[in-house]
Image (tube, rainbow, N blue to C red):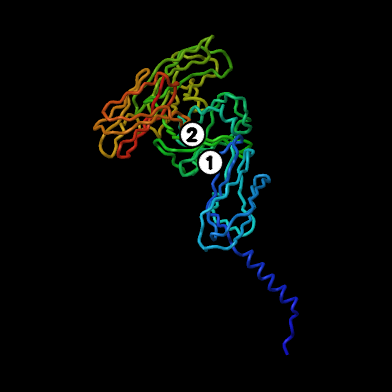
Amino acid sequence: MKPQVPMRSTMTFLFLLAALGVRAQTFFYIDSISVQPTAPTTSDAVVLSLSGGLASTGAQVTNVSATVVGDTITIAITAQDNGGLTVIVPHTEVVNIGTLATGTYSIVIAGQAVDDLASAPQHQFSVSGGGSCAGLELVSIKWHALTDTAIMVNVQNNNGTQFDYPNFILYNATGDTIAKESVNFFGITEESWHRLNLLTGTVAPANLFNGRLELWTGFTTSLACSWDLPIDLCPSTSCSTVHPYIINLGGATASGTFNWGILQGGNVVESGTFTINEDQQIDLAEPCLPPGEYTMICGGDGGPTVGTLYYGLGAGNLQETVLQPTNTVIPIPIPFSLYQPCAALVQVPPVRADGSKISLLQEPGLITLLILNAEKGHIRILDTQGRTVHTSAFSSERHTIATSAWSKGLYTAVIQSSQGQRTALRVVVQ
């Protein structure tokens, strides 16, 4: 004879099954999570939008709450279904988070009758330093003048925020890391230069590209500032000023004259004489060289017998060649590459697929766009912050733009034809 199951136990079992069945159902499916603004700062009120669908025409979200603990934002959602036609009804829940401290935050969805189907990257976002970045001017992002394995970032700090233990990271348009700075400074005060080394195996774009530069602080623990902008790592002019120099590093006061030269392919392209005397223990020159491979040499012309004299070449802050002594019988050459990744771009007019050529003529207060085989199109000019300073349409071979009211510096001209073909050119306003 089978054992009898008490009625109370049976009812409890059925009740548990029903309860489990209800909890297993989903009434709100979340397909995507978006953050507004897309790059929030500490001064922005952050809003999360949870978009997806309700399970029926009678389904609804009855409760939503958000809690922030450390760098985790937990969204608790309760949904229910009061009956209705079983079709997916598009639905978005907007959750106001408010202002947040700098850092990278993770989003966790919790609650009842909700299913989180959003992709993993949508569950994370960063908050930057906000107002403190407004006074941090991004002056330039360029190749290191003397190596193709580093990029130099020049910034001007105008607001007094120190940005403790900073380092910059450069990304391309797809979010891949191009170059990263090691932490070398206690902070950023006034003007500063930062060396970002290319990651092993990384090839930086040779032409204009859309990129993202981020400034992190606290040994890469907090995102302080970010810039999304078009980037051209090459100089804006056909030649760049370098500084061959001689210096007395001590021992005694030196005097004398020294001949120096810069060679390319065995030919002298620049030369001159350094003079050292009691009033001047360092001397330099300022030739302008196009990108390429060079060698510098320097030797005494009745030079001194005292002092410790060396020669070398500089191309900007943190951009120096090795030093070599000048008191050798045979001068020791210093080979160097100047903006080598840009060598192939010098004085080569851009050519579009349709065979037309575009170039810019510059004169004080004016730039002129020249277009062979002209067609209709428009030109947009951006500053180094990625802001549009000019936009206009053209329909002839010659298009003139006044620049007298612009600030001095580097700009990028993006020309687009009516067929959608684009060309980018560098513009320098002096």
Q: Position of residue 202 (x, y in %)?
A: 46, 43
Of the image marks 1 and 2, the number of the one nearer the N terminus: 1
- The residue closer to the viewer here, 170 or 227, is 227
Residue placed at 29% from the left, 35% from the top? 351
The residue at 56%/12% (across/down) is 253
Q: Position of residue 98 (x, y in %)?
A: 63, 40
Local secondary structure at mark 2: strand
- Mark 2 sits on what residue? 151
**Above/below status of 83 relative to 309:** below
Quadrant (top left, top right, bottom left, bottom right) of the C terminus: top left
Three-letter code, disc 1: Thr
The amino acid type of the residue labelled 2 equals Ile
Number of other residues with Cα within 10 Å of mark 2, as a class: few under 14, some 14 to 19, many 20 or more: many
Which quadrant would residue 416 be assigned to in this image?
Answer: top left
**Viewer-closest of 198 and 26:** 26
Q: Can residue 366 be seen from the camera position used here? A: yes
Q: In the rendered view, would you say 205 is above or below 312?
A: below
Can you tell which quarter of the image residue 381 is in?
Answer: top left
Residue 15 against residue 147 in the figure, above or below:
below
- Camera-side mark, 1 or 2: 1
Tell me the quarter of the image containing the N terminus: bottom right
- Find the distance from the CA under tag 1 to the CA under tag 2: 27 Å
| Residue 183 in picture, x, y percent from top left | 60, 35
Pointer 1 and pointer 2: residues touching (CB < 8 Å)? no
The local secondary structure at tag 1 comes to loop
Direction left: furthest residue: 373
Residue 391 spot, x, y in % from top left: 38, 29
Nearer to us in this view, 65 or 336: 65
The answer, for residue 335, to whether it is visible in the render is no
- Residue bearing the label numbered 1: 38
